[in-house]
Image: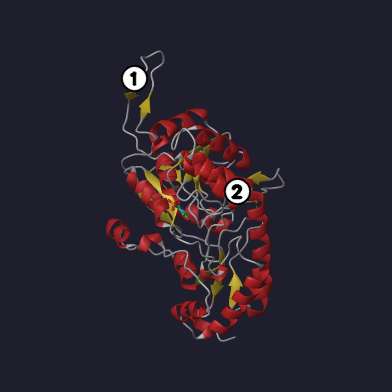
Amino acid sequence: MVMPTTPDPLSHYGRQVIDDADVAAVAEALRGEFLTTGPQVAAFEAEFAEAVGAKHAVACANGTAALHLALLALGVGEGDLCIVPSTTFLATANAVRYVGGEVLFADVDPASGLMTPYTLSVAIHRAGVKAVKAVLPVHLRGEVCELPALKALAQSAGGVLVEDAAHALGSTMTFNGAEPERVGDNAHSAATTFSLHPVKTITTGEGGVVTTGDAALAKRLRTLRSHGMTKPEGADPWVYEMAEPGFNYRLPDINCALGRSQLNKLPGFVDKRRTLAAAWRAALAPLAPAVTPAAAMDWSDAALHLMTVLIDFEGLGVSRAQVVERLAARGVASQVHYIPVHTQPYYRARYGEIDLPGARAWYDRCLSLPLHPGMSEADVARGAAALAEAIGA
Ligand SMILES: *Cc1c(COP(=O)(O)O)cnc(C)c1O
């Protein structure tokens, strides 16, 4: 038998929190009639939709599949132009390539790492006369992009927004004095995608969700998630039809049972993340201006996924590699989110050299410190002390 271990909370930049209720939920699902595509899936989808204020939620295999399904269901295809911020995980851009679309990389604000109305308008200008099919803002770290302005710009270029909210489950926002909204409610977008990977806000092991306000789109997402198979009305029981090939992107009942149990804890996880982020900000304040937390957006009440700080390595006379190594020697994990995707060999070969100074400046200075609900405020103090030593403060 493999014995469970409890690692030091600071030894991961993010990790799952699993309790006895989660274990019991999974055990119950294992003893159930279905291991996949049973009652847990629909129940999880309904509860997830409720949690984010969406009309429809479609569960799928992972966050990458969620992006792929969203673009497929929206009809993004061969040669269609999609704008993606360069500061994101590979999957946001790769999903565009899966459907044969072309990626136009937008720059980001070097203080927040987010696509902004300015960086989007520059990207749209670069598109020239070519129509833009979709714009994929990424709510990096859980901070929310300026959605109403991004939507207006996308629309004027002929496209819709698809939000990559892999980091932003539980984040809320208030635009121009309007009612507070939840990320995933699709008030500004055609669809929003989430990841349920263990580092994310809640987990199903692997898992993803697409939310949408459009019933026809939700139906299409469900069809494409399971091979593109449909049942014609009134047909014999064995009959199925396929109008276009889909994928096996289903999320099993076992995972959905875990998802339901994790969703019960979402408000607590979000509170804890907010408390820990505030503790990090207070603990790091003495290190300013050499170390500053990445910018928070006025309209966003983020359920922070990442505690990213911007460090003036040059001014401090230390390299990031040295800081990462010294933190590791003190038992503190750190990670870089992200290497600009447009600099990856594949995209360089496809689109040539592009200069995105915001994404470069962000990449030069960013470092993500541990942040997950398994941590305590004492862990934050320990992490901040380790960082002070690591930068020689
Ligand atoms: C995690 C992540 C994804 C992909 O999610 P998976 O569940 O790992 O496939 C996509 N976009 C962003 C920004 C992510 O952080």
Percent coordinates x, y for residue 348 in the rendering: 31, 61
* Image position of 282 (left or right of 343): right
> Three-letter amino acid code at disc 1?
Trp
Q: Which residue is rendered at x = 38% and y = 45% of the image?
A: 81
> Callout 2, which amino acid?
Ala
Q: Quadrant of residue 285?
A: bottom right
Q: Nearer the viewer, residue 102 or 24?
A: 24
**Label placed on residue 238:** 1
Q: Can you name the residue that lies furthest to the top here?
A: 234
The front one of 304 and 102 is 304
104 shown above or below 288: above
Which SS class for mark 2? helix
Which numbered disc flags the more N-terminal residue, 1 or 2?
Answer: 2
| Residue 285, above or below 89 | below
Is residue 191 something one can see in this rendering? no
Expressed as whole percent of the image width and height from the top left, the position of residue 134 reads 44, 43
Q: Residue at x 59, y 54 (%)?
A: 19
Left or right: where 351 falls relative to 223 = left
Q: Is residue 223 above or below residue 97?
A: above
Q: Position of residue 391 (x, y in %)?
A: 54, 83
At mark 1, the secondary structure is loop
**Dot 2 crowding, Cα within 10 Å, few <14, some 14–19, many 20+:** few
Q: CA distance from mark 1 to mark 2?
A: 38 Å
